[in-house]
Image: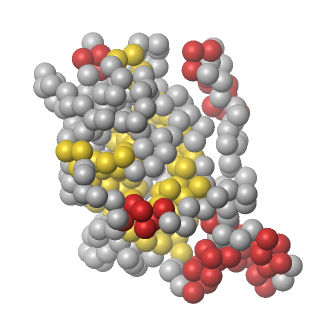
Amino acid sequence: FCGCFVRQEREDATRRHIIDQCRCGEEHCDVLEWAWDDGIPHPNSHIERGLVMFHPVYSQGTAMVRGNRALRMGMCHYWEIKMMSPISGTDMQVGVGTDQVDLYSHQYSYGSTIGLDEHSWGYSYRGVVLHRGRSYFFGKKFTQGSIVGVLLNLRRGTMELFINRVPQGQAFHDLPTDANTNLYPMISSTAAKSQMKLLNAVSFAENLQYHAMKTIYRHPQLIGELQSYPMFQSIVKRFWFLRQDDKTYNTDREDRVSKRPPEVLENAVLLKNLGEGSSKAQDETDYEVTDDVYGNLEISHATKDISCSDDDLD
């Protein structure tokens, strides 16, 4: 999807230039209905427009940032976050949380904090989703250059996830829809000098127009016909993120996810305070995790360990 980023071991000298120049996937980025909240002190994060740099000097824990306005209940919301830096460390997450989430509670310890309790729902770069301290492997992992999309339906209380604009299915169906609940987009990272960029943030009503376009966009050959009518051009443009092009839409993905056996991995990616042991989670592939503290140097800790390790603390 993005060819700008070279392999991590060769990119140190060019990382800043590449991050500044990469515009892959940003051709539709013209609507931002909210931004990252720079009115809240973020001692471990630097916010510049839509770009967030976590742990600009070094990492000593988990940094969290949220949107500057609550998402309107009864509406659908779609936003995209681009991973601008190498993906590394204990965890980097995208998700949502209520105003009950303490953004600073884990700043001196490493862990997966979005989804740690009942007030937040998170998606990890390892393809893991978390809520109420429970996690399970859900979809594709994402890496540097990936665009993570979140489609939140606050009429039905569901969250659907996208990787590089390919639907991964419905991750959650228990989000609050109460008008008295304030729900915010959130991101978090434990990795030094890690960066995420907000590309799009739109909202719309769940109506017949949306459902019709969702069906039409599964058949790209119909889009050209629809665009030939001036009255429909603005509608096609409005729902551009539903477009599949030549990608395969997994029509049975949502059904398979909803019928997944309740074999959740208790405490697999949960916060581990200093001095506590780590928990192991089984994945189908091995991968190396680059150290949080040392700014993405080639210092790796144990494979298949998605909780805090000793290397996080050194």
Residue 185 to residue 222: above or below: above
**Looking at the rendering, which quadrant does residue 216 occupy?**
bottom right
Q: For the C terminus, which image quadrant?
A: top left
Nearest the viewer among 302 and 106 is: 302
Residue 260 to residue 310: above or below: below
Residue at 31% in and 32% down: 306
Nearest the viewer among 269 and 221 is: 221
Nearest the viewer among 261 and 1 is: 261
Residue at 33% in and 19% down: 302
Residue 163 as seen in the image, left or right of residue 41: right
Residue 124 as seen in the image, left or right of residue 307: right
Residue at 67% in and 61% down: 244
Q: Return the residue found at the far right.
A: 228
Residue 262 as seen in the image, left or right of residue 230: left
Q: In the rendered image, is residue 56 in sight?
A: no
Please provide percent x and percent y for residue 125. 43, 40
**Looking at the rendering, which quadrant does residue 32 occupy?**
bottom right
